[in-house]
Image: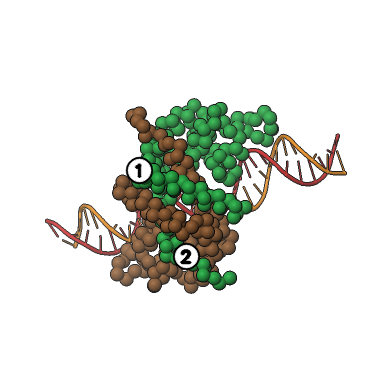
Chain colours: A brown, B green, C orange, D red
Amino acid sequence: MSDTSQWLSPAEQHAWRAFIRLHQKLVAHLGRDLQAHSKLSGADYEILVALTDVPEGRLRPQDLAKAVDWEQSRLSHQIARMIKRGLVAREDCAEDGRGIFVTLTPAGRDVIEAAAPQHVAAVRRLVIDALSPDELATLGQISDRILEHVDNVSP
Amino acid sequence: MSDTSQWLSPAEQHAWRAFIRLHQKLVAHLGRDLQAHSKLSGADYEILVALTDVPEGRLRPQDLAKAVDWEQSRLSHQIARMIKRGLVAREDCAEDGRGIFVTLTPAGRDVIEAAAPQHVAAVRRLVIDALSPDELATLGQISDRILEHVDNVSP
DNA sequence: ACATGTCAGTTGATGTGTCATGTACTTTAG
DNA sequence: CTAAAGTACATGACACATCAACTGACATGT
C-alpha cells in the first residue's frame, strides 16, 4: 500500500490544482458573460453550436450527444428546456420510428448568431491573449495527450 | 469592431476545445470514482481537503470560501448538506456573534482519510502518468499564466 | 404470429449551483 | 445613545446534472 507514488509531489500538486482552479474560473466567467449578454447558459451554447456546425441544422439526439460528449439523459432534459424557450424543436424521424430530430429554430439561430461573437471575444480576451501562439499550441497538445490517455485507461 | 480576431483560428479553436473537453472528462471521471469509492461528491472532497489543510480542522465560511474559491451562498448550501450527513458541524464563534466555524467532525476526518489515497491514485493514473515531468510543469506554468491574466483582466 | 432482447428517447427523484433576498449582529456617524 | 450602513451567513426559488426506471419501436428466432 505504501509506495513512493501514494501522494503527489509538491510540483505535481501545484500543476494539478492550478489546472483545476483555472478551468473553474474560466467556466464561471464565461457562463456569467453568456448569461448576461445572451440569456444563454454554457450548456445552451454548446447545443446551439453543435447544431449550427451541421449544415441542415438538425441532429439525432444520439449524434448530438456524441458531438458534445454528454449523456443521453442530460441531453434529453436540456432539449426539453430549450424547446420550452423556442430555441430548438423536435421533429419526427421518418427512417426510425423511435428516433427524432432536434432542429434549430429560426429564433435559436438568431440567438446563437448574436451570442457567438461576444463569447468568442471573451475566450480570446481571457485565454488566447494570455499566451503566445507556441504556448497555446502546447496547451492543445498536452490536452490532447491527456484526453487520449484517459480514453485508453478508462472504459 | 470588425478586426481579424473576431473568430478563432483553427489552431486556436482546437486548443480551446481540447482544453474544455479534457476538463469535463476529468471532472466527470474523478467525480464518479469518488462517489463510487467514498460516497463523496467532488464538492464534498474539496471542502474536506480544505478543512484538513488547516491544523485546527475548522474555518470561518469566509476563509473556507477563499480557500476553495467558491461563492458564499454555494458554500452555505454545501455546508448545510454536509452537516446533515455528519461530515462537518457548525460551531458558534465567540469573537463575532454573526460568525460561525465550520469544523471537521471525527466522522468527516475518517471519510476524507479513507477517500484521499484513492482519489490521488486516480489523478495520478489519469493525468500525471500521461505526461512527462516537463510537460506537467509546463501545464502548471501555462495554467498559472492564464489564471493571473484572468485575474488582471476581470474584476 | 409472438416472445424476447435491444435500441431511442423520456421521465421522476434527488443532489447541486446561482441569484435575489432575508436575518441577525456589528460598526460608524452624528 | 441611536439611526443608518455594512458584514456574516442562511434561505427559497429556480436552473441544471445524474441515476435508475420507464415507454414505445425495431429486430430476430422460433
Mark toward the start of the polypeptide (2 vs 1) = 2
Q: Nearer the viewer, residue A80 or A110?
A: A110
Q: Is residue A31 above or below residue B53?
A: below
Q: Nearer the viewer, residue B79 or A12?
A: A12
**Of the numbered discs in the image, which one, if any, rests on residue B129?**
1
Residue A109 located left or right of residue A154: right
Quadrant where the N terminus of chain B sits is bottom right
Q: Position of residue B125 (x, y in %)?
A: 35, 41
**Of the numbered discs in the image, which one, if any, rests on residue A47?**
none
Q: Is residue B146 above or below residue A102?
A: above
Chain letter of the residue beneath label 2 in the structure image = B
C-alpha separation, residue under disc 2 versus residue under disc 1: 31 Å
Amino acid residing under circle 2: Leu
Amino acid residing under circle 1: Asp
Q: Position of residue A27 (x, y in %)?
A: 51, 53
Question: Total of numbered circles in the picture?
Answer: 2
Helix, strand or loop status at disc 2: loop
Q: Nearer the viewer, residue A138 or A123?
A: A138
**Of the numbered discs in the image, which one, if any, rests on residue B8?**
2
The residue positioned 38% from the left and 61% from the top of the image is A67
Q: Position of residue D6 (x, y in %)?
A: 73, 44
The residue positioned 51% from the left and 63% from the top of the image is A120
Chain letter of the residue beneath label 1 in the structure image = B
Q: Nearer the viewer, residue A22 or B72?
A: A22
Please indicate, yes or no, whether residue A94 appears anywhere in the rendered image. yes
The residue positioned 33% from the left and 64% from the top of the image is A99
